[in-house]
Image (cartoon, rainbow, N blue to C red):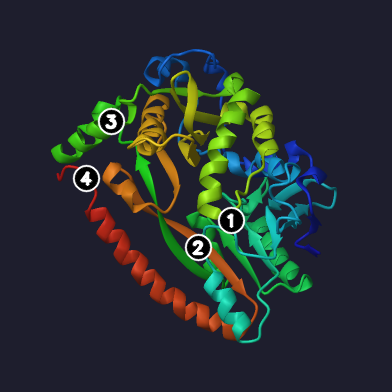
Amino acid sequence: MASNGLRIRIIQSLGEVEASAWDACAMSGFVAELDSVREPLDPKSQRSASSQRSAFAPDSTPQGHGHNPFISHAFLSALERSGSATAKTGWLGQHLLAKTEDGCLVGAVPCYLKSHSRGEYVFDHGWADAYERAGGRYYPKLQVAVPFTPVTGPRLLVSEGADPASVRPVLLEGLLELCRLRGASSVHITFPTEAEWDLFGAQGLLQRMDQQFHWLNQGYDAFDHFLGALTARKRKTIARERREALAPGISVDWLTGSDLTEAVWDAFFAFYMDTGSRKWGRPYLTRPFFSMIGETMPERILLVMAKRAGRYIAGAINFVGSDALYGRHWGAIEHHPFLHFEVCYYQAIEFAIARKLARVEAGAQGEHKVARGYRPVPTYSAHHIADPALRRAIAQYLARERLYVDSATEELAAAAPFKRA
């Protein structure tokens, strides 16, 4: 496929493109960080999280440009190489590369041919069921996304120096042509940026909205400073939850970089498998995945690990961007009241304050996060539906859904536990 002087190539694996070339597109416009300012932590140390704060000094680079670890070559290729996102698991790579006539990569799209709708966090099972009951074939479909990762980020990646206004339309045109060539029912672009969402709407794709709950840093210098912004009742509730979570002799460690040993990953994977098996039936990520990211992007990972009686009993994995902490997976082999809130939410807030990060994105769903200082924020997706009849039905549904999302967001925002001005 060729357009605008650019040639579109489809690859099935990130291994077919140089990591530096992909990341030149994925990280375009982002400020490079100097992770070396952080001292490595000793994984054998018994220090609590509060005694480790100084090891996570804020980066010396400006905030707000948003390095997104999930669209990096290291993260996406680890999903493939580990067997987590492959043709066998229903995620066949169909990544788009846009190259100039002299072979320079100027644009890319992480894309997959899907045979199911699992691991996406933007639910279209009802669309698939209705279409197939009417005699249609919903699968395969094309999914532009980071597998198993409901985190907003760029989806049409353009290299530094290239003109986004020239490259992005070619990438979108390539997606629609790929949909036709593969006989797919649709193209789904999930968790794009708002600017991309506007572009997709202008190009005729159906627009969908949902919400997540993020903690927003209002310049807090300590956790108690954050608590001071809450109503008295909520302050007392959170303080009590934190005390009770650690009451059974539990301590918390922050682990990153060289702390991420295979023994630590073994412990965390046991937590992940326990929770994943109960929630989803079959966890998405394989054990090798964690070793791979621990090797290729260790300074972008924060494990919050809870320890009792000399062994780790629970933990949460987070990824560190230049302006956000992204909470992903949690698990435990012992269950204690409020430990989930402590490890996943309150420790994340403490880390973000220590690192002067703008926000904590705590993953999909979870209205209970509002009571803990997290606020509702919009997320976006865009959808190309090939069949005109199915498109009309979905468009009508989305119009009603947006009204519900707007109403729910207003209601949840009003329930936020912050003091009224």
Q: Which mark is residue 198?
A: 2
Q: Please name which of the two marks, 4 or 3, marks the residue nearer to the observer.
A: 3
Q: Which residue is mark 3?
A: 244
- Looking at numbered disc 4 in the image, what kind of residue is underneath it? Pro
**Quadrant of the rendering where the N terminus is positioned:** bottom right
Q: Please name which of the two marks, 2 or 3, marks the residue nearer to the observer.
A: 3
Measured in 3D between alpha carbons, the distance from the residue under mark 1 to the one under mark 4, in whole angstroms, is: 32 Å
Return the x and y of residue 81 as percentages of the image width and height: 75, 42
Whether 406 is drawn above or below 62: the answer is below
Return the x and y of residue 118 as percentages of the image width and height: 60, 60
Residues 405 and 204: in front is: 405
Q: Is residue 264 left or right of residue 20?
A: left
Return the x and y of residue 406 as percentages of the image width and height: 33, 65
**Quadrant of the rendering where the C terminus is positioned:** top left
- Residue 141: quadrant of the picture: bottom right
Q: Please name which of the two marks, 1 or 4, marks the residue nearer to the observer.
A: 1
Question: Dot 1: what SS?
Answer: loop
Q: Which residue is mark 4?
A: 417
